[in-house]
Image: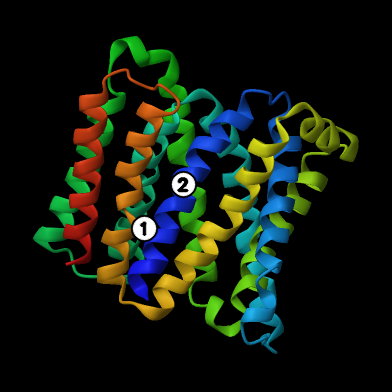
Amino acid sequence: MLALVILLYIVLTTGLNQFYKLTTHTMKKPAAQTIGLQLVAGLSCLLFVPFFEFRLPSNPWTYLFLSLSCVFYAINNYMIANVRKNLEASVIGILQQSYTVLMTMAGFILFGESVTLFKMLGILMIVGGNILVFWQQKRAKAMKYVWLGLLAYACNVVAGLIDVGYSGEFNLPFYTAFLYFVPALIILIGGRVRIADTITEYRRARKRDYLITGFCWGVHYLVLLIAYSVGEVSVVAPLASLAVFSSVLVGYFWLKEKEEIVKKIIAAILAIMGIVFITL
């Protein structure tokens, strides 16, 4: 069961990285496109509501804190759209592992978790892989998007720290949809985005790429939550990280992202090994 769930997660995450890159080719207004994709993601999750026990928490503070976390998810989602447009799909998965590093460090600082040799080695491996891929003079122009990506994942960590543990109180698909609908609303209102612009972004995009991106974006996180509900973190996290490697390979063969493929493969392997060490 767990193996099938992880395999599905890897397929969805790999598809998300590839199709999102294709979708950004037509993107003119990141905020408007992000709203549309989040709506598709949320609706995709709602399709699975009947297959799970429907329950909602009665404590109003749960909704308050969850809504607060959605503010940071909204910031993350908006910034990531710019990152995906300007970085290769094959390296997005490598950069995403910075979330694991930041979350591990937050555990050290905020929750007093023990600092072990394995965790430090894991952090160094992930950081080293990112440096290997991005730290080059000829990529200086792209470095600002690397920093933007790191800032985005830092926001994701803050959101995760706020809503940690709440998913078990909800119907899982409804909970996941909530994490897409509310940030979309926040971007719409906070960014003063016109609904007409969101519709225009949809019409401008290739419909297949757009809809697959939204579907993969929503369902891949739902599947990950399911994986964590049926397996241990120390098992799920390393297996899920295999999506880093598959994203590099698919990006190479499908999107023809062949530049420095050896470095990308080494960085992907380092990221996987780093997560294994962190979860030991």
Element type at mark 2: helix
Quadrant (top left/top right/bottom left/bottom right) for the C terminus:
bottom left
Q: Is there any visible trace of residue 65 in the rendered image?
A: no
- Quadrant showing the N terminus: bottom left
Q: Nearer the viewer, residue 21 or 103?
A: 21
The type of colouring in the image is: rainbow
Residue appearing at x 33%, y 68% in the figure: 3
Q: Which of 12 and 193 lies nearest the eye of the viewer? A: 12
Amino acid found under the numbered disc labelled 2: Tyr
In the rendering, at what x and y percent does residue 191 appear?
A: 77, 39
Residue with the most extreme top position:
138
Looking at the image, is 161 positioned above or below residue 231? above
On the picture, is 226 further left or further right than 180?
A: left
| Mark linked to residue 103 | 1
What mark, if any, has residue 21 been given in the picture? none
User: Please, what secondary structure does the residue beneath circle 1 have?
Assistant: helix
Q: Residue at point 69% right, 50% down? A: 38
